[in-house]
Image (cartoon, helix red, strand yellow):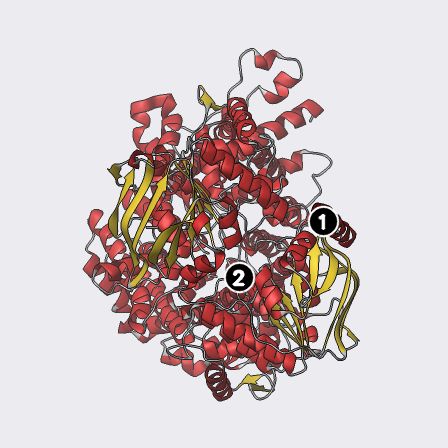
C-alpha cells in the first residue's frame, strides 16, 4: 500500500503542493539548460489553455479520462494493491466498447450508448479481475501480472484492429447512435471533444466518495488494504475484497477507455505504446492523496498540462514532451515524500519521535 | 577483584528519543570471567543500553570504557573490533545462507576474491568443539532447529573474536533442556575468561547462572548486587519497584456446560508439518483453561485453527455444540467466540484506523453501527466513547489512530471490543505480552471476571506464572499434543516444567517415587 | 529452406533479440538481490538506448568501427546515472519502489524524446552511423553443423550476454561482495549488525542494475532497431523483469529465461519462414512471453523465491 504518512493537514497538503512545485522546477531547469525560457513556456502551457473555450474543453476531456484512471488506481491502492495495469484495462475498455458499438450500429442511442459503455466497463473489470483473482488465490504479484496483461492486450488490440475489426490500422467510426457528444457542450467549447463522459465522471466521483466513506464494503476495502491479517481476523474476507476492489478498479479504468473510444475518438486504431492515461492515472491518484476532491484537482492539473503541451511547442518552441517530464517529476516527488518530511524537520517542524517507533526501526523490539 | 579485571564500564548513560528517556543515568560494570545479568521488565531499557554498547545507538550522554580506556562506540564495526559480540533475541541470521556463510558475513575468508567456506567451516568446528556448541557448518539456517540457530549466533560472535558476549533474552525460545545446555555453555565461556552479559527478566535463570546482577527500572539504574547474596523476591522487588504479589485473587471455579469442544484436531504449520497432532480437550462455562508450553509446540496453530484463521486438516471444533470446523472467522465469531489474538498489532488492530473504527471492527456490519450496508458514524462515536470510558483506554482523542496508543492501551482497546460482545467463549492468546504490571493486573482481572460471569475462557501463554495464577485447569502442550491436563491448585512449577519438556506423566510419577524412596533411604 | 538454414535463422535471430533482455534481466537480478524492486528497468533501457544512439551518431567520425561498443558503455553509464534517481528515492527518501520505478518509466521517454527534438528537431534520431554487425567466430565456425548454426554470421552480443550471466552469477554467489549484497536483500538488520553498510550495498545493487540496463538499451538501439525514437524500447524492460523472475534472481537462470524470451520474440518475427508454425497467427507468438510469465508465476513460483526484504524500506537506527 502506497501511503503518504504525515501528521497535520498542513503537512499533508505540503506533499502534493511541493511535489508539483518541484516538478515544475525540474522542468524549468531542463529548459534553462537547453536555452529555453521556462516562464514563457509555462505561461503558454497553462495560461493559453484558459484563453479559449476550445482548449478548456480539451483539457476537461483529458481530465475526465484521468479522473477514471485516478479513481481506478486509488481503490486498488486502498485495498493494498498496486494496479499498474490501468493502461491495459483502459485499452480493453476502449476495445470492447468499439467492438460492441460496431456490432450493433442500429440500436437506438438510448440503448447503444449505455450498453457500449457497460461493455467497456465489463471488459476492464474482468481483465483486472484476472490479476485480482491470481493475487487472492495464488498470492501472485499483481504488479508483474498487470504489467504482463498490459503488453498482452496491446498486442491483441493491435492485431484485432489490423486484421479483424478494422483495416489498415484503424476501425471504422462508430455510428451516430453511439456518440457521446452533446450538441450544446460541443458548441459552448468551440467544437472541442468534450462529451457526456464529463458528467459521468462527476457522478463517478460522488458515488466513489460515498462508497468508500459510508458503506460497509468501502470500510472493509480500506481495512483489508491497511492490515489484511487483522481484517481476516475480524471476519472480513481478504480474497473477496481484493477481487472486488480490482473489479471496481478495472471497471473504472475500462469505463474511462470506453469514454475515450466513444467520446474522444469514435474509433480504435493501432497504438505504438500503451495509452498514457493509465500511467497518468497513477500520478493523479498519488498526487490527489487518495481523496476524491484531490483526484479531481490533480486530474484537472494534468489535463491542463497535457493540453497546454501543444501550445508550449507551437508558441514557445519547447518540445511538448516537457509536459511528460513535469508529470514524471511530480510522481517522483510524491513518491519521495520523505524528502518533504525531511525539509520540514530541517525548518523546525521537527516531530518528537516516539521511543517505540525508533526502537522498532533499530530492530530492538521487545 | 582487581580493577584491571573490569572490561566494560558504562558510566551515567543517557539515551533520549525525543522527550522520552529510554536510558536515564545508568551505570554498568562487567568483569572478565563473570556472568553479569541485566535484569528489568519489558521496556525497562535493557535493549537500548545494549544497543548503545554495541554501537547501534549513540548515547545522548555518558561515557563508555572498554578495558579501562574511554571509548566512543559509533558503529557495530567499532564494537566488533573492541571484541563486543551480541547474540540477539531475534536471531540476526539469514535463512537462505549456510551456517558458515552466516558466520563469515562481514568478515569473509576468501582466496583471490572467491569465498572460502571450507576455511571458515574448519574454524567453526574448532570453536564448537572447544565450547560444546555442536552445529553443521554447511547446513542451511532455515533447516536447523531454533536451539541450533542460537548456537550459530553465539559462534558468530566468538568467531569474530568476541571477549565480551551479550545475550539478549536467550532462553525465550528454548525448551528447559536447551536452557540447561545453554547455561552450561555460558558458564564454560565465562570460565574461559569471557565476560558475559545476560539480558533477562527471568529470575530463576539469574540464580542459576549469573555472578552479579544489575537491575534497571523504567530507564533508571537501580543497582548492582551479588546474586549469591540476594533472594529472588529481592530481585523481583528491585525490578518492579514495589512488592509484587505473584498471585491474582480469585475464588474457586464453578464449571458448568461444555462450550468449546476440540476433538482429534490436526493442524499444519506454514511448512506443511503437523503442528497440532490429534489433540482433544473441552472448556466449560465458568472456568479458565490455561494452555501452557514452550513457544513453538503448536499452541499458536491450535488457537488459529479454533478461530478460523488456519485450516483444520482432521478432527473437529465445536462451539456451543455447533460444528464450526473450517468455517470462516466471521461464522465462528458469530457462534459466540471472542478472541484476543496473540499478535495484537498484526491481528488485533488496524493501526492506521482510528479508535472508533478499531472498536467497530467486529460489529460494523450490523445494527446499530450500520444499516443496510451504510455506516452510522454517530453510532461509531457513541460506541467508542462508552468502551473507552469503561475500559480505561488512555488516549487524547478517539479519532486518533490506534498506532498512537501505548502497547497496554492497544491491548485494552482489543479487550474492550472483544469482551463487550458478550461472548460465550473468550480466547486470550498471550494477552500480557510486553505489558507493564498495571496493565497485566487489569487484564487478568477481566479474564477472571468473565469466568465468574459464567463464560468459558481459554488462555494461552508461554509465561508459566501467568498460566498458574489465572487458570483453573492447565493443559500442557508438547510437540503438538496435550501431554496432560492438571488442576492448577494441585500442580507445581516443577511438574509443569517437566511436562512442558515432554516428560510423560508416568515418568514424572516414577521420578517422584524414586525421590521419595531416596529420602526414605537417607532418613533410614 | 533447409533444416540447418532454419536453425541458423532461429539461432541468430534468437541471440539477437535475447541480447538486450539478458543484460537487462541480469540488471534486475542485481537490484532485487539487494532488496530494491526495479520496475524502472524499462526507463533505464530507454535512457541507454537514447544515449548510445546519440553517441553513435555524434562520435562515429572519431571512433569508427568501434563506435557501437563505446556507445554501449556510454549507454551503460547514462543508465547508471539515471538509476541513481531510483537509488536516492528508494534508499534515502523511502519512496515506494514501484512508484519511483514508475516515475522513471514515465520520465525516460519524455526526457529522451525531448532531447532528441532539441538536437535533431524531430522525434527520432534517424538511422545510426554504425550498428552492431554480425560476426563469424574463427575456428568455432568450422565445427561441423554446430559451427554453421551457432558461430557463423551471428551477433557476438548474445554470447557476451551469456558470459555476463556467468560473471554475474560468480559475483553474486562466489564473492564476499555478492554475499553481502544478498545479505542486505534478505535481512538488512542482520547485515548491519555485522558491520555491513546496508545503504552502500543497496546503492551498488541499483547502480549495477542501471549500468547493465543501460547496456541492454544500447544493444536494443544499436543492434535491433538501428535508431532511437519513442518506440525503440517498447516493453523489453518489462519482459526482462519477467525473465528475472523466471530465472529466480540467479544470473545464469535469468540468462536462460532471457534467451527463451528472445527466442519467442524472434519466432514472431521469423516464424513465417518456418514450415510448422508459419500458419500460426503471429499474435500468439507475440503474447506468448507475457502469458507464459503469468502462467509460470502462478504455477511454479511461490512467494518465497524472491529476496525476503524486497521492496521494504530500510531505515538506519540512531
In which chain is the residue bearing label 2?
A: A
Relative placement, left or right, of A119 versus A318 is: right
Query: Circle 1 marks a residue in which chain?
Result: B
Q: Residue at x 20, y 60 (%)?
A: A40
In screen coordinates, is B484 left or right of A246? right
Q: How crowded is mark 2: few (under 14 residues within 10 Å), some or many (20 or more)?
A: many
Residue B443 in the figure: left or right of residue B223: right
Q: Which residue is drawn at 69% across and 59% down?
A: B476
Most foreground residue, B505 or C182: B505
Image coordinates for residue B116, horizontal then vertical, percent = 50, 23
Can residue A244 be seen in this snapshot? no
Farthest front residue in view: B524
Q: Position of residue B300 (x, y in %)?
A: 64, 59
Q: At numbered mark 2, what does the secondary structure look like: helix, strand or loop?
A: loop
Q: Residues within 10 Å of mark 1 (few under 14, many from 20)?
A: few
- Image mark count: 2
* Residue A306, percent from left and from top: 36, 63
Frontmost of labels 2 and 1 is 1
Task: Tell me: residue A137, above or below residue B88.
Answer: below
Residue holding disc 2: A81
Residue placed most toward the observer, C289 or C6? C289
Mark 2 and mark 1 residues within 8 Å of each other at the beta carbon: no
Q: Distance between the residues labelled 2 and 1?
A: 63 Å
Discs 2 and 1 lie in a common subunit = no
In this rendering, does residue B323 appear at all? yes
User: Dot 1: what SS?
Assistant: helix
For residue B17, above or below residue C118: below
| Front-lying residue, A303 or A267 | A303
Question: What residue did someone put label 1 on?
Answer: B515
In the rendered image, residue A361, in percent from the top left (x then y), is placed at 40, 54
Amino acid at each position: 500500500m502506497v501511503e503518504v504518512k504525515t501528521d497535520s493537514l498542513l503537512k499533508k497538503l505540503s506533499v502534493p503542493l511541493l511535489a508539483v512545485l518541484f516538478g515544475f522546477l525540474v522542468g524549468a531547469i531542463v529548459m534553462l539548460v537547453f536555452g529555453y525560457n521556462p516562464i514563457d513556456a509555462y505561461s503558454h502551457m497553462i495560461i493559453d489553455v484558459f484563453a479559449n473555450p476550445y482548449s478548456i474543453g480539451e483539457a476537461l476531456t483529458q481530465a475526465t479520462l484521468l479522473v477514471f484512471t485516478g479513481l481506478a488506481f486509488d481503490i486498488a491502492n486502498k485495498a493494498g494493491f498496486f494496479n499498474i495495469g490501468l493502461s491495459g484495462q483502459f485499452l480493453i475498455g476502449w476495445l470492447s466498447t468499439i467492438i460492441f458499438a460496431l456490432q450493433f450500429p442500429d440500436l437506438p442511442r438510448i440503448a447503444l450508448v449505455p450498453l457500449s459503455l457497460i461493455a467497456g466497463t465489463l471488459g476492464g473489470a474482468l481483465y483486472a479481475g484476472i490479476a485480482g483473482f491470481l493475487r487472492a488465490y495464488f498470492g501472485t504479484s499483481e504488479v508483474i501480472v498487470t504489467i504482463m496483461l498490459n503488453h498482452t492486450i496491446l498486442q491483441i488490440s493491435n492485431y484485432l484492429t489490423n486484421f479483424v475489426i478494422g483495416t489498415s490500422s484503424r476501425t471504422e467510426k462508430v455510428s451516430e447512435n453511439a456518440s457521446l457528444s452533446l450538441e450544446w457542450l460541443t458548441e459552448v467549447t468551440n467544437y472541442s471533444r468534450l462529451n457526456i463522459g464529463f458528467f459521468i465522471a462527476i457522478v463517478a466521483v460522488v458515488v466513489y466518495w460515498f462508497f468508500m466513506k459510508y458503506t460497509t464494503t468501502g470500510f472493509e476495502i480500506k481495512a483489508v488494504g491497511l492490515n489484511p491479517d487483522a481484517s481476516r481476523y475480524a471476519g472480513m474476507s481478504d480474497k473477496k475484497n481484493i477481487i472486488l476492489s480490482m473489479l471496481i478498479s478495472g471497471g473504472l479504468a475500462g469505463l474511462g477507455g470506453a469514454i475515450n473510444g466513444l467520446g474522444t475518438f469514435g474509433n480504435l486504431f493501432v497504438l505504438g505504446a500503451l495509452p498514457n492515461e493509465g500511467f497518468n492515472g497513477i500520478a493523479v491518484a498519488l498526487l490527489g492523496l487518495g481523496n476524491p476532491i484531490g483526484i479531481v484537482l490533480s486530474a484537472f492539473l494534468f489535463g491542463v498540462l497535457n493540453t497546454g503541451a501543444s501550445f508550449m511547442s507551437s508558441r514557445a518552441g519547447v518540445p511538448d514532451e516537457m509536459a511528460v517530464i513535469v508529470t514524471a517529476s511530480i510522481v517522483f516527488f510524491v513518491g519521495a515524500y520523505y524528502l518533504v518530511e525531511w525539509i520540514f524537520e530541517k525548518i523546525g517542524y521537527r516531530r518528537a519521535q516516539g521511543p517505540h517507533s525508533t526502537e522498532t526501526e533499530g530492530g530492538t523490539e521487545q | 577483584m582487581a580493577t584491571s579485571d573490569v572490561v566494560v564500564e558504562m558510566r551515567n548513560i543517557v539515551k533520549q528519543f525525543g522527550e522520552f528517556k529510554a536510558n536515564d543515568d545508568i551505570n554498568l560494570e562487567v568483569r572478565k570471567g563473570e556472568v553479569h545479568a541485566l535484569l528489568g521488565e519489558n521496556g525497562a531499557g535493557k535493549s537500548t543500553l545494549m544497543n548503545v554498547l554495541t554501537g547501534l545507538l549513540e548515547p545522548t550522554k555518558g561515557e563508555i570504557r572498554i578495558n579501562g580506556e574511554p571509548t566512543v562506540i559509533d558503529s557495530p564495526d567499532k564494537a566488533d573490533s573492541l571484541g563486543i559480540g551480541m547474540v540477539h533475541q531475534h536471531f540476526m541470521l539469514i535463512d537462505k545462507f549456510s551456517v558458515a556463510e552466516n558466520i563469515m558475513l562481514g568478515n569473509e575468508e576468501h582466496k583471490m576474491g572467491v569465498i572460502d567456506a571450507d576455511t571458515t567451516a574448519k574454524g567453526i568446528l574448532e570453536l564448537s568443539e572447544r565450547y560444546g556448541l555442536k552445529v553443521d557448518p554447511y547446513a542451511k539456517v532455515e533447516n536447523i532447529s531454533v536451539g541450533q540457530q542460537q548456537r550459530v549466533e553465539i559462534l558468530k560472535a566468538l568467531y569474530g573474536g568476541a571477549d565480551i558476549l551479550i545475550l539478549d533474552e536467550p532462553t525465550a525460545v528454548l525448551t528447559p533442556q536447551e536452557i540447561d545446555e545453554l547455561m552450561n555453555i555460558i558458564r564454560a565461556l565465562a570460565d574461559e575468561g569471557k565476560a558475559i552479559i545476560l539480558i533477562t527478566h527471568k529470575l530463576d535463570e539469574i540464580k542459576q547462572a549469573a555472578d552479579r546482577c544489575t537491575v534497571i527500572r523504567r530507564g533508571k539504574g537501580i543497582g548492582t548486587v551479588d546474586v549469591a547474596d540476594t533472594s529472588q523476591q529481592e530481585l523481583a522487588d528491585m525490578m518492579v519497584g514495589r512488592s509484587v504479589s505473584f498471585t491474582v485473587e480469585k475464588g474457586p471455579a464453578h464449571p458448568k456446560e461444555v462450550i468449546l469442544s476440540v476433538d482429534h484436531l490436526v493442524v499444519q504449520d506454514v511448512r506443511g508439518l503437523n503442528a497440532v497432532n490429534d489433540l482433544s480437550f473441552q472448556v466449560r462455562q465458568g472456568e479458565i483453561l490455561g494452555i501452557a508450553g514452550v513457544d513453538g509446540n503448536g499452541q499458536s496453530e491450535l488457537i488459529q485453527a479454533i478461530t478460523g484463521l488456519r485450516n483444520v486438516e482432521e478432527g473437529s471444533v465445536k462451539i456451543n455444540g455447533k460444528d464450526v470446523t473450517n468455517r470462516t472467522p466471521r461464522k465462528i465469531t458469530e457462534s459466540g467466540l471472542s478472541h484476543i489474538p496473540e499478535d495484537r498489532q498484526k491481528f488485533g488492530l488496524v493501526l492506521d484506523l482510528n479508535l472508533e473504527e478499531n472498536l467497530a471492527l467486529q460489529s460494523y456490519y450490523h445494527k446499530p453501527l450500520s444499516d443496510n450496508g451504510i455506516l452510522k458514524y454517530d453510532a461509531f462515536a457513541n460506541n467508542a466513547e462508552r468502551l473507552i470510558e469503561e475500559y480505561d483506554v488512555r488516549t487524547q482523542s478517539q479519532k486518533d489512530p490506534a498506532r498512537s496508543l501505548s502497547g497496554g492501551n492497544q491491548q485494552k482497546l482489543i479487550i474492550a471490543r472483544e469482551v463487550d460482545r458478550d461472548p460465550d467463549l473468550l480466547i486470550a492468546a498471550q494477552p500480557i505480552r510486553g505489558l507493564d504490571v498495571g496493565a497485566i493486573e487489569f487484564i487478568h482481572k477481566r479474564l477472571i471476571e468473565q469466568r465468574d460471569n459464567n463464560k468459558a475462557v481459554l488462555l494461552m501463554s508461554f509465561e508459566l506464572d501467568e498460566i498458574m495464577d489465572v487458570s483453573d485447569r492447565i493443559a500442557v502442550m508438547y510437540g503438538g499434543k496435550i501431554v496432560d491436563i492438571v488442576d492448577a491448585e494441585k500442580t507445581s512449577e516443577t511438574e509443569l516444567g517437566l511436562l512442558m519438556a515432554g516428560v510423560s506423566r508416568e515418568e514424572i510419577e516414577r521420578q517422584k517415587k524414586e525421590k521419595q524412596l531416596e529420602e526414605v533411604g537417607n532418613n533410614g | 529452406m533447409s533444416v540447418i538454414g532454419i536453425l541458423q535463422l532461429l539461432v541468430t535471430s534468437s541471440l539477437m533479440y535475447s541480447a538486450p533482455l539478458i543484460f537487462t534481466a541480469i540488471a534486475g537480478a542485481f537490484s532485487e538481490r539487494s532488496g530494491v524492486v526495479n520496475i524502472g528497468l524499462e526507463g533505464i533501457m530507454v535512457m541507454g538506448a537514447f544515449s548510445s544512439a546519440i553517441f553513435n551518431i555524434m562520435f562515429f567520425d572519431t571512433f569508427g568501427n568501434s563506435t557501437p561498443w563505446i556507445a554501449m558503455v556510454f549507454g551503460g553509464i547514462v543508465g547508471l546515472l539515471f538509476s541513481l534517481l531510483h537509488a536516492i528515492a528508494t534508499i534515502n527518501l523511502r519512496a515506494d519502489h514501484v512508484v519511483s520505478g514508475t516515475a522513471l518509466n514515465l520520465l525516460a521517454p519524455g526526457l529522451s524524446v525531448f532531447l532528441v527534438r532539441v538536437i535533431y528537431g524531430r522525434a527520432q534520431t534517424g538511422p545510426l552511423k554504425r550498428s552492431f554487425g554480425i560476426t563469424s567466430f574463427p575456428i568455432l565456425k568450422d565445427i561441423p553443423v554446430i559451427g554453421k548454426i551457432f558461430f557463423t554470421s551471428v551477433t557476438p552480443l548474445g554470447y557476451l550476454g551469456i558470459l555476463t550471466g556467468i560473471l554475474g552469477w560468480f559475483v553474486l554467489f562466489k564473492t564476499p561482495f555478492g554475499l553481502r549484497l544478498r545479505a542486505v536483500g534478505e535481512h538488512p538488520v542482520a547485515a548491519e549488525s555485522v558491520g555491513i553498510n546496508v545503504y552502500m550495498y543497496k546503492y551498488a545493487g541499483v547502480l549495477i542494475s542501471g549500468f547493465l540496463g543501460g547496456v541492454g538499451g544500447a544493444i536494443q538501439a544499436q543492434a535491433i532497431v538501428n535508431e532511437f525514437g519513442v518506440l525503440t524500447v517498447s516493453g523489453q524492460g518489462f519482459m526482462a523483469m519477467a525473465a528475472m523472475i523466471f530465472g529466480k534472481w540467479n544470473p545464469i537462470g535469468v540468462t536462460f529465461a532471457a534467451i527463451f524470451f528472445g527466442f519467442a520474440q524472434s519466432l514472431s518475427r521469423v516464424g513465417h519462414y518456418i514450415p510448422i508454425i508459419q500458419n500460426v497467427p503471429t499474435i500468439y507468438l507475440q503474447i506468448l512471453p507475457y502469458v507464459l510469465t503469468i502462467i509460470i508465476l502462478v504455477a511454479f513460483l511461490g512467494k518465497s523465491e524472491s529476496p525476503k526484504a524486497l521492496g521494504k524500506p530500510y531505515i538506519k537506527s540512531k
